[in-house]
Amino acid sequence: MSGAGRKRERTAPAVSDYDVLVIGGGPAGLSAASFCGRKLLRTALFEGDCWGGILTRWCPDKRIDDYPGLSPGIRAVELAHSLLEFARRAEVDLVEKRVEEITEDGEVLAGGERFRGKRVVIVGGGDTALSHAKRLSGIASRVTLVHRHKTFRTPNALPEELEREGVEVLLSHSVETILGADSVEGVRLRSATTGEERDLPVDAVVMAVGTKPNSALLRELRVSVDWTGRVVTDQWQRTSVPGIFAIGDVSSHLKMIVTAVAQAATAAHQAYAEVRSPYWK
């Protein structure tokens, strides 16, 4: 969340259009954007996969019984839909693009532009990897999906479907080494079937494996993280870099929706104080 929206799903907003940019459309991001919008801060929310985050991607039918005030047994996807509608009512701009980079001067690069015209290898076989492959297939000059197993970990796509979209699929392969000194020049692939190794020239590698909190964007800005990789914040969810806040799984050891929403409210309050400098600050 960055202190620098309106049901419009925009595609390429300029940073200067907004007071606050929120990255990630899970419970924390949706709530933070909504609270900012309700405070009349011009707010954009970026999500490159699916609105609701883990709620809709991994466990849409899970019963939510520990969120105060909700009817027992509400499904995760229903709660995600409610949070999304809350953001729309707050007139947040919903931007369906994945943020790839945040520059030191605050510019946000989204939608795969950093990969335009490049040869890209995506490592992984789950929904996230497939989402990356489909999104970059019309942007990168070549997209190669590498997965160490014989089949994908998701039933949502078949190799033939990706290949029809121009994605090269290498199952039963792993990336052993990323080649290049100062920049990526290629990868060394290893076949799990034969053990044979070969080098593939590429310009970029996307690691789309696991479900750990994604704090890589913030680490590139030299935001302080602890030994587990979680972002260090103060009581107002401020990071070590002025104007940058962290909420949700990237900064919390307690993985609960109610905790993420509470952090969102805290960060939104502080962002409002820093952007508007109200009389009570």
Image (cartoon, grey):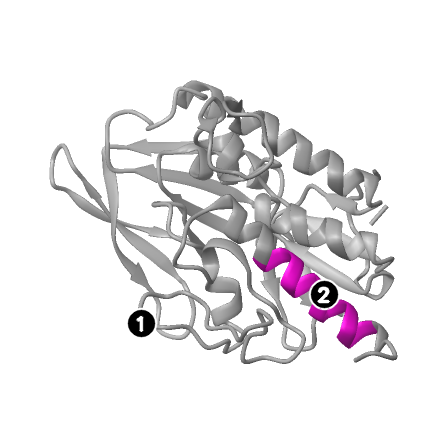
Report the disc number at residue 250: none
Tell me how far mark 1 sits from mark 2, CA to CA: 28 Å
> Going by the image, does 210 lie left or right of 183?
left
Q: Look at mark 2 in the image and give the residue it sits on.
A: 269
Secondary element under disc 1, as helix, strand or loop, is loop
Please state which of residues 113 and 79 is positioned toward the viewer in this rendering. 79
Q: Residue at x 77, y 57 (%)?
A: 36
Label 1 Cα crowd, 10 Å radius (few <14 / some 14-19 / many 20+): few
Q: Look at mark 1 in the image and give the residue it sits on.
A: 227
Point out residue 235 in the picture as x, y percentages from the top left corner. Answer: 55, 73
Would you place residue 45 above or below residue 163 in this image? below
Would you place residue 183 above or below residue 116 in this image? below
Which badge, 1 or 2, comes first in the chain's sequence? 1
**Magenta-drawn stretch, dominant element (helix, strand or loop):** helix
Q: Assess whether residue 106 is covered by the magenta stretch.
A: no
Hey, which quadrant is residue 71 in on the image? Answer: top right
> Going by the image, does 207 lie left or right of 36?
left
Q: Assess whether residue 274 is covered by the magenta stretch.
A: yes
Specify whether residue 1 is in view: no
Please state which of residues 84 and 216 is positioned toward the viewer in this rendering. 84
Specify whether residue 32 is in view: yes
Q: Nearer the viewer, mark 1 or mark 2?
A: 2
Furthest residue toward front: 69
Q: Residue at x 67, y 54 (%)?
A: 32
Point out residue 195 in the picture as x, y percentages from the top left corner. Answer: 11, 41
- Mark 1 residue type: Trp
Label 2 Cα crowd, 10 Å radius (few <14 / some 14-19 / many 20+): some
Residue range highlighted in magenta = 263-275
Q: Residue at x 45, y 38 (%)?
A: 128
Would you place residue 47 above or below residue 150 in this image? below
